[in-house]
């Protein structure tokens, strides 16, 4: 599956699971390595870097930004193999039981 196809499905799944959330796609050309998505849900947010497989290459600065944002909020790499775990982690971070 291409990354853009997985990302489109992921956004749809996020909007279905977290009704009322806002998903922003970041411009990859603006800041090198900035994560792909920001998900706002009520007064919380999550940062996601989308990959098409668990073994996909990380581009320069992606690990840095996921680590940096992870100090403040839920931030991680997401790929088809861990999508459900990531959505569960977001739910926990957003205060779902």
Image: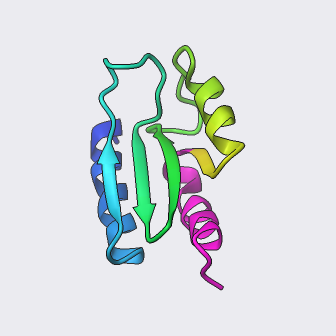
- 57 vs 9: above or below: above
Name the chief secondary structure element in magenta. Answer: helix
From the top left corner, tell me how far across and down residue 82 is, in percent. Answer: 59, 54
Magenta stretch: includes residue 96? yes
Image quadrant holding the C terminus, namely bottom right
- 41 vs 26: above or below: below
From the top left corner, tell me how far across and down residue 7 is, in percent. Answer: 34, 47
Residue plotted at (69% across, 34% down): 67
Residue plotted at (27% across, 51% down): 8
Please state which of residues 61 and 41 is positioned toward the viewer in this rendering.
41
| Residue extending furthest toward the front | 43
From the top left corner, tell me how far across and down residue 63 is, in percent. Answer: 63, 27
Task: State the colouring used for the structure image.
Answer: rainbow
Magenta stretch: includes residue 48? no
Q: Is residue 2 visible?
A: no
Please state which of residues 41 and 52 is positioned toward the viewer in this rendering.
41
Residue plotted at (44% across, 38% down): 52
| Residue extending furthest toward the bottom | 97
From the top left corner, tell me how far across and down residue 24 is, in percent. Answer: 31, 48
- 3 vs 12: above or below: above
Question: Which corner quadrant of the image does residue 94 belong to?
Answer: bottom right
Q: Is residue 72 left or right of residue 19?
A: right
Image quadrant holding the N terminus, namely top left
Please state which of residues 47 and 83 is positioned toward the viewer in this rendering.
47
Q: Is residue 23 left or right of residue 77?
A: left
> How many discs mark residues in the rendered view?
0
Please state which of residues 45 and 75 is positioned toward the viewer in this rendering.
45
Q: Can residue 79 be seen in this view?
A: yes
Range of magenta residues: 77-97
């Amino acid at each position: 599956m291409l990354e853009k196809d997985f990302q489109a499905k992921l956004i749809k799944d996020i909007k279905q699971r977290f009704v009322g959330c806002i998903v922003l796609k970041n411009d990859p050309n603006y800041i090198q390595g900035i994560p792909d998505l920001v998900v706002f849900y009520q007064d919380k947010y999550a940062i996601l870097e989308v990959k098409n497989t668990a073994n996909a290459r990380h581009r320069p600065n992606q690990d840095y930004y996921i680590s940096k944002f992870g100090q403040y909020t839920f931030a991680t790499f997401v790929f088809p193999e861990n999508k459900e775990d990531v959505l569960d982690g977001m739910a926990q971070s957003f205060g779902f039981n």
